[in-house]
Amino acid sequence: MLIDAARCTGCGACRIACQMQWQLPPERFYNRLEFREFGRYPKVRQEITPVQCMHCDNPPCETVCPTRATYKRSDGIVLIDHDKCIGCKYCITACPYDVRQVNEKGVPEKCRFCAEYVTQGENPPCASTCMNEVRVFGDLDDPRSRISELMAKRDVYTLAPEKGTRPRVYYVKK
């Protein structure tokens, strides 16, 4: 996923679409918007950063899971097998992005990149709902995909690269 935070207005449609798709209560969400203010009055600006599971190539949540409930699919999507999860919450502690939520059964959950949609060639609701096309989802292994073409033209970065997780969610540099 490529996120162009400069296009984000903070409307929250991405979060609401996700909550509606997965029938999450208002207090539980798989993506969030972080608001930061910079400068001094009267020259103040606000930056909004959408944050969700980074579907890392080197996911620490997978490494610490004693039952292998957290796993990475061959396409790179990191998922949780609820039947294997014992609720130890090591994955929550290991994640440097603070993106896991505990459900009513005590099982950690997170963004799944809507793997069911991706398998059918569709976009996750957070990407398809955004009126400003903040999120672009696609196949980075396909040089002709929209995301690959955009990333070839733009400077991009990842969150917390020093953690060594090699996130698969990229952000456009401003």
Image: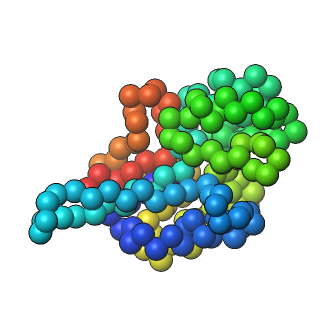
Q: Residue at x 43, y 74 (%)?
A: 132
In the orientation shown, which residue stands out farthest toward the right? 83
Within the image, what quadrant is residue 40 found in? Answer: bottom left
Within the image, what quadrant is residue 3 found in? Answer: bottom left
In this view of the protein, can residue 68 be seen by the observer?
A: yes
Q: Residue at x 80, y 25 (%)?
A: 67
Q: Is residue 12 above or below residue 156?
A: below
Q: Is residue 174 above or below residue 23?
A: above
- 13 to the left or right of 68: left
Report the quarter where the C terminus lies: bottom left
The foreground one among 113 and 122 is 113
In this view of the protein, can residue 118 be seen by the observer?
A: no
Residue 42 image point, x, y percent: 12, 69
- 91 to the left or right of 171: right
Numbered circles on residues, count: 0
Q: Residue at x 50, y 35 (%)?
A: 96
The foreground one among 148 and 64 is 64
The foreground one among 32 and 2 is 32
In the orientation shown, which residue stands out farthest toward the bottom? 131
Q: How is the image coloured?
A: rainbow
Residue 169 image point, x, y percent: 49, 47
The foreground one among 145 and 104 is 104
Q: Residue at x 38, y 72 (%)?
A: 9
Within the image, what quadrant is residue 18 found in? Answer: bottom right
Residue 53 image point, x, y percent: 57, 46
